[in-house]
Image (tube, rainbow, N blue to C red):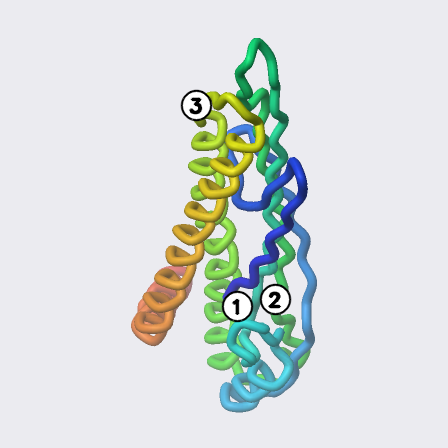
Amino acid sequence: MKKILIIFGALAFSTAVAAAASLSKSYSYFTIGGSTLSQIEEQLKSRGPQLDSTGQRHPGATSMEFKTKIDYSDSNGWCRIAKAEVGLKAAVTLPRWRAERQAKQDVRLIWNILERDIKRHEESHIIIAKNHARELEASLRALPRKRECAELQSVAEATTQRLLAKHDAAQLKFDRIEAINFESRLMRLLDYRLEQMERAAR
């Protein structure tokens, strides 16, 4: 799940990343207990981060802050974009299980698979943001010059809003697909892990 914070300023709009854009990530954790799968599930539901967008708690979350800084150059009767930079700051929240020693081996196995899948899901949200950020930065840099900087700034704002909407739609689509395929994906990962363990035991 993802949570997005957009920051706007006079000469700085907010959105995704680009090829030359910066990305910073930080991680925080919430602790869960439980020695059975049902207990772990309940812990995730009661202790997981709560998203404002859904009002529900989730096994993980990623808060993304997109910042775009634009410098304008006004000369010879024309205004153009001299510089456009986009940065992404991502804060990922993940679960940390503290009752592993009390759990049976099959529970530990499933938890390891689930934990990796939760992290993969949150990292995927960041990848989606980065891909759209590249598009945003390239689009801003390619904006044609205008007679007035106010006009060019208005075009830049509209471009940012359009690509933000495209980005949000991609994130929502990703969450829908992930939710539909969760059980089958988990079973595939479990089967794969069991095969690895069987090969190692031979």
x, y percent for residue 62: 58, 61
x, y percent for residue 27: 67, 57
Mark 2 and mark 3 residues within 8 Å of each other at the beta carbon:
no
Q: Which quarter of the rendering shows the C terminus?
A: bottom left
Q: Which residue is mark 1?
A: 115
Question: Where 107 sits versus 187, above or below?
Answer: below
Cα distance, mark 2 to mark 3?
Answer: 43 Å
Looking at the rendered structure, the secondary structure element under dot 3 is: loop
Residue at 54% x, 75% y is 58
Cα distance, mark 1 to mark 3?
Answer: 47 Å
Which amino acid type is shown beneath numbered disc 3? Pro
Q: Which residue is mark 3?
A: 144
Which mark is first along the chain, 3 or 2? 2
* Along the viewing direction, whichever of 55 and 145 lies nearer the viewer: 145
Mark 1 and mark 2 residues within 8 Å of each other at the beta carbon:
yes
Q: Which residue is mark 2?
A: 94
Which amino acid type is shown beneath numbered disc 1? Glu
Q: Does residue 202 appear in the picture of this structure? A: no
Q: How packed is label 2: few (under 14 Cα within 10 Å), some, or many (20 or more)? A: many
Which mark is first along the chain, 2 or 1? 2
